[in-house]
Structures are given as C-alpha cells and as structure tokens.
Amino acid sequence: MRKVKKISCVSCGKEALEKDEIGINKKLLGEQVETFYCMDCLADYLGVSVEDILDKIEEFKDQGCKLFE
C-alpha cells in the first residue's frame, strides 16, 4: 500500500491539500515545484480570484490534462 504524503500550504499552513490544488500549482507554477499553495493563497499569490482558478481547473480537465485525472 502506497503511503500518500500530506502536502501543506507553504503560506498559511493548511494541511492535506486536495488533488486539484496540487495539480493547479504544478500547472501554473511548473511541474517541478516543491512548495504548494492552497486555493486561497494561490489566488492571492497570482492576483486572481479563487473562482478564476476553479474555472481554469475545469478548462484543463476538459482538455484532458493529466494533472487533473
């Protein structure tokens, strides 16, 4: 059984980020990124709304992006 590493937000410390949160960090900040933001902190960091990020996630899912399977 594979142990899943819990990833926390580097900014606010929110624990156990969701799969889509990790995926959007990799998609927008680079797949090699080692620190991750929760949705709220990523939106602040990028200067956009959480809704904008959620819309992007849906777009990437529709495009078949492997980060959001």
Image (cartoon, rainbow, N blue to C red):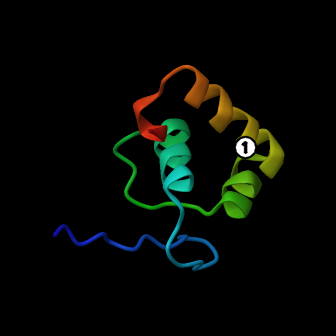
Classify the position of the N terminus by image quarter: bottom left
The residue shown at (68%, 58%) is 39
> Which residue is situated farthest in the front direction here?
1
Q: In x, y percent, where is residue 55? A: 75, 36
42 or 61: nearer the eye? 61
63 or 34: nearer the eye? 63
How many numbered circles does the render carry?
Answer: 1
Corner quadrant of residue 9: bottom right
Q: State the SS at label 1.
A: helix
Classify the position of the C terminus by image quarter: top left
The residue shown at (64%, 37%) is 57
Is 5 on the left or on the right of 52, as rendered?
Answer: left
Is 26 on the left or on the right of 9, as rendered?
Answer: left
> Which residue is situated farthest in the left direction here?
1
The residue shown at (58%, 61%) is 37
Corner quadrant of residue 34: bottom left
11 or 68: nearer the eye? 68
Residue placed under numbered mark 1 in the picture: 54
Position of residue 1 relative to residue 43, above or below, is: below
Is 28 on the left or on the right of 5, as rendered?
Answer: right
Residue type indicated by callout 1 = Leu
Position of residue 57 relative to residue 59, above or below, is: below
33 or 69: nearer the eye? 69
Q: In x, y percent, where is residue 36? A: 50, 60
The residue shown at (49%, 23%) is 64
Corner quadrant of residue 11: bottom right
Is 47 on the left or on the right of 63, as rendered?
Answer: right
Answer few, some or many: residues within 10 Å of disc 1's Cα (few below 14, many 20 plus, some between 14 and 19). Answer: some
Position of residue 23 relative to residue 9, above or below, is: above
